[in-house]
Every structure is written in C-alpha cells, then in structure tokens.
Image (tube, helix red, strand yellow):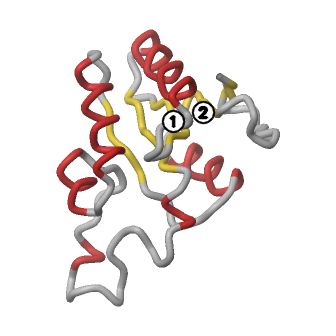
Amino acid sequence: MPTVIAVTADDDRYTASRRAAMDLAKRESAELILYDWDSATVLGDPLPSVWSADGTDNEVPDRLDESALEAAGRHPIAIQVEEAKAAGVAATAWLPSEKGTDALLKFGHEHGAVAIVVPSDFDRLADDRGEIKIVEA
C-alpha cells in the first residue's frame, strides 16, 4: 500500500501539513503515517531499545497505532491518528530517534512514500532520487 507521510508534533503546530496529508492520503488511497518531528529531540530513544527490558526491542513495529502511542507517552499524537481514522484514512504514526530532514527522507524511502507533506516554513527538502513528491502546506 502506498504511504503519505506528514510531519506532525504533539503541540499541533503543524496542523495544516497534517490535514493536507490526510486529504492527499484519502485521494491516493494511501496509508497516512504521522511523523512526530519532536520525538527525536526528547532525551533518549522514544521507543524500546536493546537496553530496555529483555526482548522489548524485538516487539517494536515499524508503525504505531493509538495504543502503542499511548504506551510511549505520546497521547497528542494518538489523538491525531484517531482523527485521521475518523476521517476515513488508514493512519499510524512513527516516533523517529534520528533528527532532521535526512532522517525523514530516509524513512520515506524505507516505507514506500508517494509523498511527504511538510510545513511551508521547513528547510528545503528535496528527494534527490525523484521518487517522493514533497508537498509544502
């Protein structure tokens, strides 16, 4: 299934990009992945690692639903996933541990993104492979 990735944050300062991505995902019959821009700035990895309880690093999916987001302490992002689903869009989220646009673009390639929707005030993001449409909203 194709994916559309939207930059989001728990303080909802990226509402316009998230809503534009929801519309695009619906038109493209794509899954929406909300990419929590701030999770990489939080001290420590936002998800279980090899230093966590035995075996937890093997249980982490590559996309998180509402219950996994709640367990990770990301309630506002869980609410955003619920909002997208209520609008009829298949939606999940991701809490990246790497910061920056390079990590975002890499994630897009790894997840077959047809588009990445970013806020209009972001540093220029371009896919040098030309595979992913970059949309500013």
Q: According to the image, label 1 marks what residue?
A: 5
**136 relative position to 90: left or right:** right
The local crowd at label 1, few if under 14, some if 14 to 19, many if 20 or more residues have their Cα within 10 Å, is: many
SS state under label 1: strand
SS state under label 2: strand
**30 relative position to 125: left or right:** left
Question: Residue 50 lies in what quarter of the image?
Answer: bottom left
The local crowd at label 2, few if under 14, some if 14 to 19, many if 20 or more residues have their Cα within 10 Å, is: many
Question: Residue 49 lies in what quarter of the image?
Answer: bottom left
Spatial distance from mark 1 to mark 2, Cα to Cα?
5 Å
Q: Position of residue 13 (x, y in %)?
A: 55, 37
Viewer-proximal residue among 28 and 44: 44
Q: Is residue 113 above or below residue 101?
A: above
Q: According to the image, label 2 marks what residue?
A: 116
Residue at (50% x, 76% y) in the render: 43
Amino acid type for the residue under numbered disc 2: Ile
Amino acid type for the residue under numbered disc 1: Ile
Q: Tell which residue pokes out farthest to the top in this image.
A: 27
For marks 1 and 2, the one nearer the N-term is 1
Marks 1,2: beta carbons within 8 A: yes
Quarter containing the N terminus: top left
**76 relative position to 109: left or right:** left
